[in-house]
Amino acid sequence: MEWESIIGLEVHVSLSTKSKLFSGTASTFGAEPNTQANIFDLALPGTLPAFNENALQMAVFFGLAIGAKIGKRSIFDRKNYFYPDLPKGYQVTQLDFPTVGKGSLTISLEDGTEKVIGVTRAHIEENAGKSLHEEFTDQSGIDLNRAGEPLLEIVSEPEIKNAKEAVAYLKKLHSIVRYLDISDAIMAQGSMRCDVNVSIRKKGDNKLGTRTEIKNINSFRFVEKAINSEIIRQQEVIEDGGTIIQETRRYDANKDITSSMRSKEVANDYRYFPEPDLLPIVIDDSYISSIQSALPELPDAKQRRFISDYGLSKYDAGVLTATRELAEYFEQVAKKCGDAKSAANWVTGSLLALLNKDDIEIIKSPIDAERLASLIGRIKDNTISGKIAKNLFEIMATNFSSVDELIEKRGLKQVTDVGEIEKLITKVLNDNPNQVQQFADGKEQVLGFLIGQAMKASQGKANPEQVNELLKEKIKQKR
Amino acid sequence: MILDKSEVRKIAQLARLHISDADVDEIGHRIKEILTLVDQMQSVETKPVEPLYHPFDAVQKLRPDVVTERNNREELQKLAPKAEMGLYLVPKVLD
């Protein structure tokens, strides 16, 4: 039986405001437990919410970035449920009138094609606190630092077909959020979280199958694995004659399975109603256009510009625009060395390999844009060969002297003096009479060997093109 | 409209309220009265009426994104029945 899967993502992004959504308490990551939890965050009686304008701006900023309809009148609602890390007994969210309405973003698929994924909505809501169940016996510890932290929940249309598309969507979302600098969006720290809805149906069916929701997946890789594992599980259930139950599941990365989170308790009814402590949020066109004017160049536009301005391949342009910081780094190198293609090759090749090896962020690169640009400059002006440059690059990762200093001190300068190269070649030819004879007998392949010997004798410093030319000339004279 | 004892108990559980067996009938009766009133309200034609989200005809004021609160954990945790290692302790919950 052929199956197809349909996936929808709900992504929570913590907005990087200084203070919380409804209180003046600091909202930074990694503080000591409950040191960022004050009377409002603890829901002490008599406290009232005061809405943070920056959270609204960030939400609108995101909405405009995905071409969404902006809600000019948004309304907060209470979602009621009981849990100790939710001291008020309700979460303030936006149910019917979210700040961000329908928008979309474009993902690139592996075969090079593009696909538009609809974003249903994005609403502002407050985070809950954190419960720690492991530390104590018969008790749970509650940390309310995160309680009331502003979140943007971004809901996709069920237009994602498989795990790869889901990851591409998530990465694009991550990239946009980072370009806008409205969130750290670090999945491992929980500032970006992802719930995945998965259903399957027989290929060609129009009706959606029953979906399950996998909660709180904390890495791109696990999103992909969790979806694949859930799709297989659902297929097996149905093929064995069973039915899918609509439920919440969790993903166990060690076992690579999803398992039901269903509790014995009665299913919750959130009893939504408008939050009486907050008035409607009303914004006008001038508010929206002032935020619009602050939009930076976004990844898709930047990628197109890199292709047209620098003549890069779509793939390279995609890699280089994945983060704003990387794109800026590349542009600095390209401008300083005046050779965008070389800059792209070095950045996507050696530099990213170096950074990925030790998981270093581009802004902390041991080789800054300036030094990489001068390295490329020294290849272009024939001071050093490309091969030497690769070695020098490795040296530069741990030695922070200037490129020229390193070339000077380590004697890496390319030999371009004809007399000197001729001397080298004469020696190589004299040392290898057998190969010279073979060449004379018509075995032209030995040329490569002899060039290699000459380069080796120069410790890689001779200009390879010159060696090539001069060697051919000399050996022909011997024939 | 039907409201039997099991429904009263279910509602109580959802609301995390403990009610004694002796009270179930009385509470069921009172909820039923409320539901009758709700039914009466449901019968009102509301299509032409614009929904009211807030009784005040006003717009939410916005607060600048400034940290105004300081860490006051020590004082606040004195209010809690139990706190340890900076955490508020509650009876064990697992979802």
Image (cartoon, coloured by chain):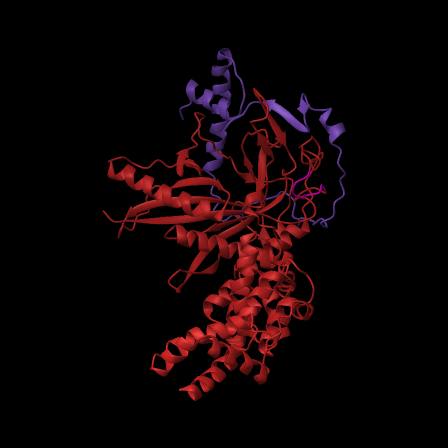
Chain colours: A red, B purple
In reply to whether residue A435 is colored magenta, the answer given is no
In reply to whether residue A28 is colored magenta, the answer given is yes
* Residue sitting nearer the eye, B55 or B45: B55
The span picked out in magenta is A25-31
Farthest top residue?
B22
* Residue sitting nearer the eye, A117 or A40: A117
* Residue sitting nearer the eye, A39 or A259: A259
Q: Quadrant of residue A409?
A: bottom right
Residue A325: image location, x then y, percent? 61, 61
* Residue sitting nearer the eye, A349 or A335: A349
Across the whole image, how many numbered discs are drawn on residues? 0
Residue B52: image location, x then y, percent? 57, 45
**Left or right of A19, for residue A133:** left
**Left or right of A334, for residue A451:** left
Farthest bottom residue?
A477
Question: Up-down: is B95 above or below A65?
Answer: above
- What secondary structure is the magenta-colored segment mainly? loop
Is residue A458 among the parts visible in the rendering? Answer: yes
Is residue A70 among the parts visible in the rendering? Answer: no
Residue A3: image location, x then y, percent? 28, 48
Question: Up-down: is A378 above or below B7?
Answer: below
Residue at 70% x, 41% y is A23
Residue at 54% x, 67% y is A346
Residue A143: image location, x then y, percent? 63, 32
Image quadrant containing the C terminus of chain A: bottom left
Residue at 47% x, 82% y is A471
Residue at 55% x, 44% y is A188
